[in-house]
Image (tube, rainbow, N blue to C red):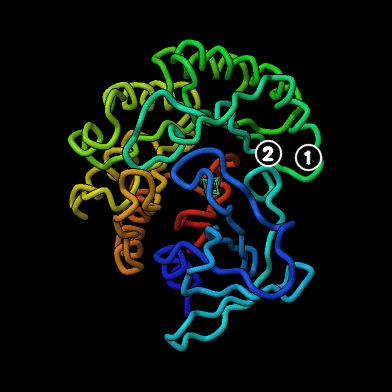
Amino acid sequence: MEWKRVKAELLAVGRVALKGEDCRAYISRSTAGPTAGGEGSVFFSVGGRRVRLSVDPASPLLLHHEGAGKAVIVSGGHGREPLRGVLENPGLHCPRQAYITLSERCIFSCRYCTVPRLHGRVKCPEEVLEKVKGVLDRVDAVSITSGVAESLDQEEKQVLDVVRRVVPLGKPVGVSVYPTLRTPDLLHDLGVAEVKWNLEAATPALFARMCPGLDYDLMWRALRRSVELFGEGAVCSNVIVGLGESDGEMARCINDLTRAGVIPVLRPLSPAAELAGWSRPTADRLLRLLGIQEQALRDSGLDPRRVRTMCTACTGCDLTPGRDT
Ligand code: SF4
């Protein structure tokens, strides 16, 4: 079976029960986004291509760890061939990157996100620098994300303080936070390589319903300004699949982004927080949207394989054209 089909089916389940040898060294614990908290997740890779799966003892997918990272995934019941691969070392959050969350808390309350409920801590710039230095010899990039602990201005200041310290370490730096209109210029001036401002929802109406208090128009303005500064293909945007949008609405959003020089990251919904009872998108839908995304990227001359930081480089949670296909 083709890798993209295998990965789509794994993403449609999204979680795995761990069996066999101790896996603790391979478990990554997320402090940002909908999968923050919980039992963590593992990165399973086959021939250099990876998928991230949340750890859940009740999952119909079983991952048997044979030791030293060698693992096999079997699905409870429906007779698929066992899938052999390896567990990857998670680095800081994800393999080959120091991906740091500054504020593990948020004053906003997007309906799909657990971060506001966790009341996590805020890391200081010195702590971040030490963490990054500790893994520098085994990562290719440094990526920074954050909730909004107090205010947008305060958060921006915090991010800039961290960026000033990590850019001189010599790895490409990517930043994904909730921006203000000046954030793209400020980060560009400091030598950041890539940015990711997340539209989150395929339409403004869905965004308004899912992310009260956040500004869809601001995201678009920040995206457009960022393409002017960082260049086409150095700006990404996560859009969640499964918030109630139609395929047509998602196709429009994908094409709007690629025409603007932005690489869309199509993120399958991880039902959590207020959306805990919702369903993940099916494998067939993910593959259908992947086809639309591939065509849109081709039409605009954008190549996700050139992105060096954050989700487009990691690929753990999404089907990524060029890397998974
Ligand atoms: S794709 Fe993004 S959110 Fe998912 S594990 Fe990788 S860096 Fe983290």
Residue, x 64% and y 63% (percent of image)?
48
Compared across the picture, whether 131 is left or right of 226 comes to right
Q: Which residue is mark 1?
A: 135
Compared across the picture, whether 271 is left or right of 311 comes to left
Dot 1 or dot 2: first in sequence order is 2
The relative height of residue 82 versus residue 115 in the rendered view (above or below) is below
Q: Nearer the viewer, residue 299 or 99?
A: 99
Mark 1–mark 2 CB contact (< 8 Å): yes
The amino acid marked with disc number 1 is Val
Looking at this view, name the residue that lies furthest to the bottom: 79
The amino acid marked with disc number 2 is Ala
Residue 36 location in percent, x, y? 51, 43
Residue, x 75% and y 32% (percent of image)?
131
Label ID, residue 98: 2
Does residue 193 appear in this view?
no
Compared across the picture, whether 315 is left or right of 92 comes to left
Residue 289 location in percent, x, y? 31, 58
Q: Nearer the viewer, residue 268 or 124?
A: 124
How crowded pointer 2 is (Cα within 10 Å; few <14, some 14-19, many 20+) is rated as many
What's the CA distance linking mark 1 and mark 2? 7 Å
Residue, x 48% and y 47% (percent of image)?
35
Judged from the image, the secondary structure of the residue bearing numbered disc 2 is strand
Residue, x 44% and y 44% (percent of image)?
34
Judged from the image, the secondary structure of the residue bearing numbered disc 1 is helix
Label ID, residue 240: none
Q: Is label 2's Cβ within 8 Å of ligand 1?
A: no
Does residue 202 appear in this view?
yes
Picture quadrant where residue 101 is located: top right
Picture quadrant where residue 167 is located: top right
